[in-house]
Amino acid sequence: MYAYKTGIPLIDDIGGGFEAGTNILMLAPSMSYAEQLAYALVKPLTGEYTIVLSTNERTAEVIDYFRFAGIDKHSIGVIDAITKSSVPSITDTPRLMFVTSPTDLTGIGIKFSNMIESIFEGTFSQSESGLFPPPIRFCVNSISTLLMYRRLEVLFQFLHVLTTKLKKVEGMGVYTLNSESFDDKTLSLIKQLMNVVIEVKIEGNDNYFRLMGIKGIDADWRKFSVTKGQVALL
Amino acid sequence: MISTGMDGIDDMLGGGIPEGSKVLYSMEPGVDGQLFMISTLHEALAKGRSCLVILPHTTVDAFLHDAENLLGSRLGTSGKTIVFFDAVDRDRIQRYTKDRKTAAREWQGRITKLCTENHIDVIFMYLDVIYDDFGLEGGLGLLPSLQGCDHKPTLIIEHLNFEGENLLMKFIGELGFDLVISIRGSFLPTPHFNLFTIVHASWSPQPKRSVPFLISGGRVVPYIPKIVVTGPPESGKSVFVAHASENGLSVDRRGLSGDTTTVAMDFGWVRRKDFDITLYGTPGQPRFDPMIPVLLKHAIGVVLVIDATKADQIARARYLYRMVTELKVPAVIAANKNDLQGRMSESEIRDGLGIAKDIPVLSISAQRREDVLGVLESLVDFITQFSY
């Protein structure tokens, strides 16, 4: 089975990376490096594809992040739930798709399916990896915003559909959630859908993460930084 | 009747949706089925009906742009035949009302006003977000019991269904919906296809049935993935498939007599009665019989072609017909070569084949495309009415 490398030796040295079908919840406070860490984990390697569901940033900002990390934009797909509210006439392309707001779970679900389908059909971009199933990294940034728009029960069901589909296509998913804004019930419900939890905290000016749910890795806090899409343990 | 905007589905429903009905398009998450609602709206507008569209998840401009992209043409929004209640209206109500009860009253008031002022014929409602805000009964209760309007409008709802069959049964039972169509998908890596199921149509005794569909040229096109054309040698199967098809091929070989015979299969594709149909023709020679069950596998319908001028072929045709009956799928008999002398009567054919009275026997010449298409139309009718 395919393993998704992360560039973090701590994870890659055990089993070669995240197993295909892994869904990872990233719990982090505001103003932390969680977003950069999430994007670094879903940064596509050669032959891989990445889909980002962005509820916080416009497509251009997401693409810019990966461009600065030296990634070919042709392997990145974005489902943008921000731009269309101000530019209603914006039109979908195979790699950039738009929904009016994070409320529109119907639209998000359809765009996600369409993007996966186009990757499988080889129409997503001109370059094909030749791997089957094509390795797909997926990032939801963030669940917190979706929760502001939709009821927890509905969002749970929706995320259940997404995480299950990602398992079926042997992808890997990272889902960011603000750890400060939601109660324990919400956090534990969302955790049920995940295989791995990465917690992020800030102490002073330093960021730390700890991993839970990976065999062979303890849950100690580790100081880290992210530079140009590369995670460094300090 | 109000057309769904999808001819194939209208046919299955006996012409469309009766005025004043309550309709649900239930969408499974991730299934590209938004065109069902949009097609019905497009058709209602094209027929000059006044429509209210309630879309709390998006704005009017974004909706119109999306609809245009889906349809490949603009929604007919000229004149005063379409009014909207969109995300901006929802936000405004949320901002200025203190609680859910007051918000519900505000929604009801606005919808009633829109209905009465515009003499609304059809209400299109995207239920999903409303369900979140007010619950199912509460959400449907926002519609002014359809009493605020001077006549009872037809109600068409699209809903993202996370609750599966239970919710559908609730719509049919407790909520008394007249038509429930479930739009589902098979999310496998590949191949990927979608299907719709007419779960319930109160005015039609048809059994529940599922039909695959394609989105093509801005339309929902029901898809019949396999109709098999079989029959004795030289009965005209290849000619049938060739004349039916807009695209097709035949794997033939010239025999010692100089005539060609099918040695593998015929293959064709045709759009008829708004259905996309793929045709598979079998060889007729007995030596290819082991192939026939393979070709018949997963067939949705069968055309048995016989040469009506050759009574000596009836035994072979009967043998093939028995294979077909084991499939328990709709079948029609095409009695070919009706332009020639010495053909058998329909009763002779029926007796010879030993077929039931409800199996259509159609006298045709496979050389005439209209005859061939007539057979396919008859089979499509049979398929859409058939209890599998």
Image: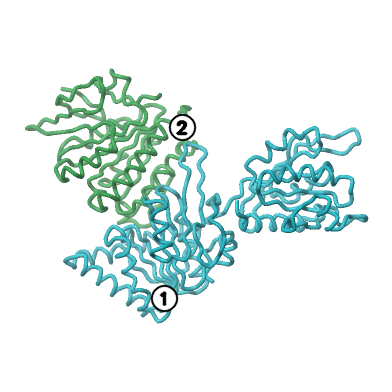
The label on residue A127 is: 2
Q: Where residue B60 appears, x then y in whole percent? A: 36, 64
Q: Residue at x 34, y 66 (%)?
A: B140
Q: Where residue A68 appears, x then y in whole percent? A: 28, 33
Local packing at callout 1 (Cα closer than 10 Å; few below 14, some 14-19, many 20+) is many
- Which of the two residues, A148 or B20, is positioned nearer the viewer here? B20
Q: Where residue B125 appears, x then y in whole percent? A: 38, 64
Chain shaded cyan? B
Q: Which residue is mark 1?
A: B120
Q: Colour of chain A?
A: green
- Measured Cα–Cα span from mark 2 to mark 1: 51 Å
**From the viewer's perspective, is A9 left or right of B68?**
left
**From the viewer's perspective, is B203 left or right of B62?**
right
Question: How many numbered callouts?
Answer: 2
Identify the residue at the far left of this view: A204
Mark 1 lies on a secondary structure that is: loop
